[in-house]
Image (tube, rainbow, N blue to C red):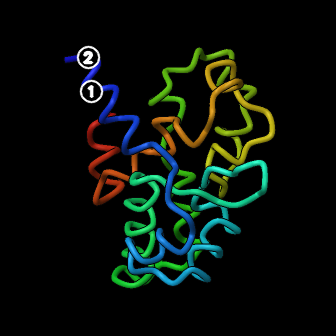
Amino acid sequence: MKETENKILADVNGAVYTLGIASQLSGIPAHSIRQYIEKGLLIPFKRDSMRHLFSMNDISRLKHIHHLIQDRGLNFAGIRALLSMVPCWKIKECAKKDSQECKGILMAYQPCWEASKKSLACKNENCRECEVYTCLSNSAELKSVLRELF
């Protein structure tokens, strides 16, 4: 059972789709996807050639970001502010000492994955695969994520 779960997880996290295919699968124009990347709302996998590749989780996240813009009327700054409110210290269960020095917690309007100095719990982790980054990919609303944490 564990092996099957790992294979399914690898399949949804596997970055195999090019920008054009991600655009087709999500129904979002490629130029919009590039903007989401530029604004730090999406962290695609980068090949050595600097080409972006996307996973099914990325496609889900793209759709969620697009929903926030089109249906909820948020702009990039509003989405960044929402993402910065995700309590990474609670999700990662950081030690109090680590959390007092972590820029991911201290930055007011930036998501934790953009922090230059991270806590020990996050220091060597790939942000693309972190549960803080992925929590909104599979969730309809931030409130439901916060409700589960508190």
Q: Are marks 2 and 1 in contact (CB under 8 Å)?
A: yes
Evaluate whether residue 17 shows in this view: yes
Quarter occupied by residue 135:
top left
Q: Is residue 75 left or right of residue 4?
A: right
Quarter occupied by residue 67:
bottom left
Q: Which residue is mark 2?
A: 2
Q: Residue at x 32, y 45 (%)?
A: 145
Rendered location of residue 96, percent (x, y): 61, 17
Q: Residue at x 47, y 44 (%)?
A: 14
Rendered location of residue 80, percent (x, y): 58, 63
* Label 2: few (<14), some (14–19) or many (≥20) C-alpha neighbours in 10 Å: few
Evaluate whether residue 150 shows in this view: no
Q: Is residue 15 left or right of residue 145?
A: right
Q: Is residue 18 left or right of residue 12?
A: right
Q: Is residue 97 left or right of residue 74?
A: right
Q: Which residue is mark 1?
A: 5
* Label 1: few (<14), some (14–19) or many (≥20) C-alpha neighbours in 10 Å: few
Rendered location of residue 63, percent (x, y): 38, 69
Residue closer to the observer: 22 or 61: 22
Instruction: Give the vertical position of 105 relative to 44 (above or below).
Output: above
Count the numbered circles shown.
Answer: 2
Rendered location of residue 149, percent (x, y): 33, 34
Label 1 sits on what residue type? Answer: Glu
Callout 1 secondary element: helix
Label 2 sits on what residue type? Answer: Lys
Callout 2 secondary element: helix
